Image (cartoon, grey):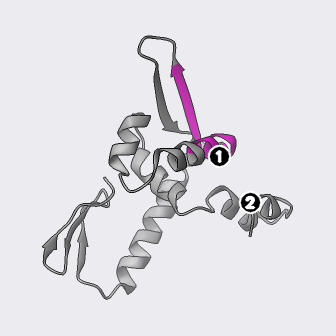
Amino acid sequence: MVKNELMKYSCPLGKAMSALGSKWKPIIVLVIKDRKLRFGELAVRINVISRKVLTDQLREMQTDGLIIREEFKELPPRVEYSLTEKGLALLPILYLLEEWEAKFDNKEVQYDKDCNLIVEDKKIKKAVV
């Protein structure tokens, strides 16, 4: 369902899913956590997302009130992203989703506390940092 269609409904779950409706937004929230990160740092930590998609997702999240974009007027230009109070309130919910998935996941996959993939089928891999 398109985001605009979800926003038509006054249902709180519909509005929440509209704000987090993409696969990238929850990952972005988990990567930012309680710190400030520059765009380049986010792009490196989520290396499987294109810069265009990351830019689009950050803009939508800013519009939805999940992140703060702080622009510094200096050379070279610097922009930092951090979570708003609304964005920070998502962290416990996303951690519960991680626990839920881990409980019912049958794969031999191990992650560290920052959701970095450590071992998958006895091969060392790297994922979202």
Instruction: Specify the quadrant of the image occupied by residue 6.
Output: bottom right
Of residues 123 and 85, the one nearer the viewer is 123
Residues shaded magenta: 58-71
Going by the numbered disc 2, the residue's amino acid type is Lys
Q: CA distance from mark 2 to mark 1?
A: 10 Å
Q: Who's the residue at 43% across and 77% down the image?
A: 100
N-term-proximal mark, 2 vs 1: 2
Q: Who's the residue at 51% across and 47% down the image?
A: 54
Going by the numbered disc 1, the residue's amino acid type is Glu
- Which residue is labeled 2 in the image? 3
Q: Is residue 121 left or right of residue 68?
A: left
Q: Secondary structure at mark 2?
A: helix
Callout 2–callout 1 Cβ contact below 8 Å: yes
> Relative to 21, does residue 109 appear above or below in the rendering?
below
Residue 65 covered by magenta stretch: yes
Of residues 9 and 54, the one nearer the viewer is 54
Q: Is residue 61 left or right of residue 120?
A: right
Q: Residue 120 location in percent, x, y?
A: 21, 76
- Which residue is labeled 1 in the image? 60
